[in-house]
Image: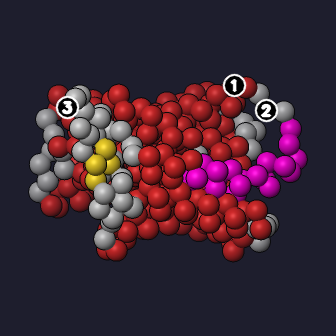
Amino acid sequence: MPAVMSRSLPATAWLPSLAFVLVWSTGFIVGKAIVPLADTSLFLLARFAVAGLMFVGWSLAAGTAWPPLREAPRHLLAGALMQGIYLCAGYGAVAQGLPPAIMALLGALQPLLTALLAIPLLKELPSRRTWQGLALGALGVALVVAPAMQVGSQPVSPWIVLLGVLAIVSITMGTLLQKSAIAACDLRASSAWQNLGAMLVAGIMVAIQAADAPLHWHGGPTLWATLAWAAVGLSGAGTWLLVSLVRRGQAANAAALMFLAPPLAALQAWLLFGERLDAVQGLGMVVAGAGVWLCQTRGRLRHAEAR
């Protein structure tokens, strides 16, 4: 018979999850802030470079054991998928005309896709409660982004939509890879390698764009502050927390936390930029929160085992 975890998370166990969603949700604000200041691929290359150096320094200072070089390609691939392709494709889709609301809605598919792929790849079968939470979370995100989707809707090329889908598939596969053989490596050393993998993707994109037109980088306090937060907060703390949560528990439950990113981003945009926040979005925040709560409480994990 499958083994089922029915124990609820202790109160202190919510702190890493809460920290993760607060940090991760700021990615939407960062993406909006850098558009007039720098080319997104160039910004991402700088972001991954700073984060990579930070993890290298941390690993050296702590005397962390580095993985054998023969295992480096796995870490590079995980970083290329989870950060490099995900962010380059996602930012690129928005830059090419995909409405951010549509990108956020596509992002709501990521926890569902993670849950489905985790069954054959990780032998993790989410409980009925988790499936219910995933469905509620997706509905909540849809309600949050619905008003933005109704404003100024214009036809979008299917290729641009596919670019957004590529971003979601990429972060899903990168998340699942965190529970593969690389999970045995110290997270600091692994993060250093993974940021290098992300840098390789961003570097290729920068080279392609530079061949067509000059890249822009309008340095100033806003850009440098945004880069510092993106590197230390998002690629540093945010990714660290996500990978830690994935390694400790079920991939689908950790991914479900991402349902809270669009609602929190909408709240931040309302506070910082005075953007609209109506009753439908408020309802969506509550529904998404209920979905995440279902995923993170009892009945969280069931391993798919042969009878």
Task: Examine the residues drawn in magenta and state their main secondary structure.
Answer: helix
Q: Secondary structure at mark 2?
A: loop
Left or right, 307 with respect to 52, comes to left
Residue type at the position of mark 2: Val
Please give the residue where the numbered disc 1 appears in the rendered image: 159
Q: Position of residue 122 (x, y in %)?
A: 30, 34
Give the number of the mark in front: 3 or 2. Answer: 2
| Residue depicted at x 37% and y 71% | 15
Q: Is residue 112 visible?
A: yes
Q: Is residue 139 magenta?
A: yes
- For the N terminus, give its image quadrant: top left
Q: Is the Cβ of the residue at disc 3 closer than 8 Å to that at disc 2?
A: no
Q: Is the Cβ of the residue at disc 2 closer than 8 Å to that at disc 1?
A: no
| Residue depicted at x 70% and y 67% | 282
Q: Is residue 61 magenta?
A: no
Figure check: 194 above or below 23: above
Figure check: 20 above or below 214: below
Q: Secondary structure at mark 3?
A: helix
Q: Which residues are magenta?
A: 136-154
CA separation in Å, label 2 and label 1: 8 Å
Left or right, 293 with respect to 41, comes to left
Please give the residue where the numbered disc 3 appears in the rendered image: 71
Q: Position of residue 24 (x, y in %)?
A: 50, 59
Please give the residue where the numbered disc 2 appears in the rendered image: 156
- For the C terminus, give its image quadrant: top left
